[in-house]
Amino acid sequence: MIEADGITKRYGDFVAVDDVSFTAEAGEVVGFLGPNGAGKTTTMRILTGFLPATDGTARIAGHDIFSDPLAARRAVGYLPETPPLYPEMDVTGYLTYVAKIKDVPRGQRKAAVESATERCGLADVHRRVIGSLSKGYRQRVGIAQAIVHDPKVLILDEPTVGLDPIQIREIRHLIADLADPEKAAHTIVLSTHILAEVEAICRRVIMIHNGKKVLDQSMAELTEAGESLEDMFARIILREEEAA
Amino acid sequence: MRHVGAIAGRELRSLFVSPVAYAVLTLFSVLAGFFFLLSVQGFSEAINYYQQIGQFEALRGINLNNQLIGPFIQVMWIVFLFLIPGITMGLFAMEKTNGTEELLMTSPLTMWELVLGKYLAAAAFVTLLILMMGFFPSLLFLDGDTPVLGLLFGGFDLADPDPEGLQTLAGLLGLWLLGLTYAAVGTFASSVTRNQLVAFFLALALLLVLWLLSVVADLGVAEGAAGTATGLASVLTWLSTSDHFDKLARGLIDTRDLAYFGFMIGAFLILTKTAVESVRWR
Ligand SMILES: Nc1ncnc2c1ncn2[C@@H]1O[C@H](COP(=O)(O)OP(=O)(O)OP(=O)(O)O)[C@@H](O)[C@H]1O
Ligand SMILES: [Mg+2]
């Protein structure tokens, strides 16, 4: 569903992402881990077509992000680091607009908006102006806009930032539900700094450090090794720092 | 092209919940009214003057189109110069500050859909301004015996009291095209910065330069040896908005002037598309 092939991003001499390759199957939830500035956001921006890669490419649901960008983008739902919101619009108006530009057919728009509103716990505020919502609610609107067109692939940059514990649990349920192989079997890539979140919902962990992929393992293997994710994170990052 | 409407519609709705649209509409009505009254006053003073000095020949040559409506439309360019950049400054700059650029650029939109959607929103606003402005000259089309005209002219008997409808429409068409061109320039200015104020002043500067190109050309001709500078001077004069607009404002429709405005709109929209795309090559 996602096939990233040697993605590299350079800003002048600085290499933000260095030859990152991975694949993610349908029904898989992949957690992107890494310290601040590791290159997680940059990688996601390339996968969603927001930034061009200096080198390498990726295929989303079989569509190359550079040679077939429109089809690739149609298949992706993306929650950027800052939710892309228009403060002056109300929640329903905003989601309807997103549904339009994401090619949801006219007849299905209303249902799509209602379902995204429902799933992200926005039913009570759907007539409110986005600018008047609290940070957590704005984050929920951000998640709702990522799923409104029911994309095959979801790329979520720190989706649970700013949410209250109940909502974090709900969003994790939502993510697990979206990825459920028995149901929609979406492919989901999410970045986070909350290791417990990775343990709770991810089937695979990809760790990035200084732009390089330093770990790519299934959660099952990691738990088998018996080391806590936190210890492992520290161990790998410190090892890399020493090597550098 | 099916996304153009969605983008333009959202833009217009946002414009009309923001104070900017209403500030511009209010300012525009006040300024248009003011300049109209000035034009009326200038017109009646001219009649007064000719009557006093007994120039009845000149008096007969005066008509509402050439001495009132034309000058009124001509002077409105200065209002457009300041107001249209105010309308367009947010078009792209706001998307960048909102972070919604990431939504647009990762949606299945083509660059042309995005640029045209934005531009059409601004163009619709300009059209609204023209319709509002048409109110003033239309006063002159009311029957001569109505109080409005009596009020305006103190009951003068004009040799030719009726304005030309077509000539007036041609003038308004000219102003509309000028506004559409200014909107294209403003759209471009908004696409190269994330700061609305910078977009506003950049548009203002570009529009002033465009207007003054013909003045520059005239200076060049005066200074340089006659004949040598004419090639460049004629290009500059052609590129300048002023001559094309002045002709149309007076009601003279010439396809070459229409082509000029079409060319400028197209050129600035292509520039906008290039600028928006270049986000990708940072
Ligand atoms: N436009 C840019 N020009 C130069 N360097 C940039 C640019 N954008 C990002 N970078 C650099 O690229 C590196 C990776 O940034 P990125 O935002 O991908 O990190 P991240 O893993 O998402 O970090 P965080 O956990 O803090 O969100 C950083 O060192 C950042 O400073
Ligand atoms: Mg990040």
Image (cartoon, coloured by chain):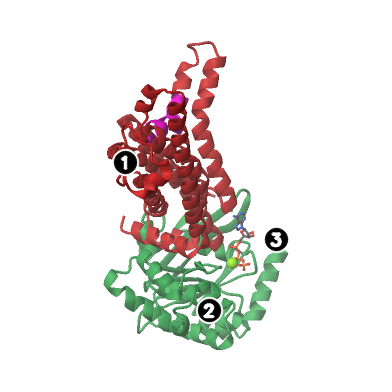
Query: Does B235 sit above or below residue B68?
Result: above
Given residues B166 and B164, the one toward you in this image is: B164
Q: Taken as a whole, is the magenta stretch helix, strand or loop? A: helix
Q: Is residue B79 magenta?
A: no
Looking at the rendered image, the disc whose residue lies closer to the viewer, 1 or 3, is: 1
In the rendered image of this protein, does residue B9 appear above or below residue B48? Answer: below
| Mark 2 or mark 3: whose residue is earlier in sequence | 2
Q: For numbered disc 1, what is the local secondary structure? A: helix
What is the x, y in percent for residue A106?
A: 29, 69
Residue at x-position 28% and y-position 38%: B166
The numbered disc on residue A137 is 2
* Chain (red): B
| Helix, strand or loop at mark 3 | loop
Q: Residue at x 43, y 29 (%)?
A: B243
Could you give the CA–CA distance between mark 1 and mark 3, rounded to whole angstroms? 74 Å
Chain bearing tag 1 is B
Q: Colour of chain A?
A: green
Q: Position of residue B118 (x, y in %)?
A: 42, 54
Chain to which mark 2 belongs: A
CA neighbours of label 3 inside 10 A, class few (<14), some (14 to 19), many (20+): few
At 52% from the left edge and 17% from the top edge, which residue is drawn? B221
Which residue is farthest right? A242
Q: Are marks 1 and 3 on the same chain?
A: no
List the residue tagged with mark 1.
Answer: B169
Labels 1 and 2 share a subunit: no
* Span colored in magenta: B235-249
User: Residue tagged by mark 3?
Assistant: A244
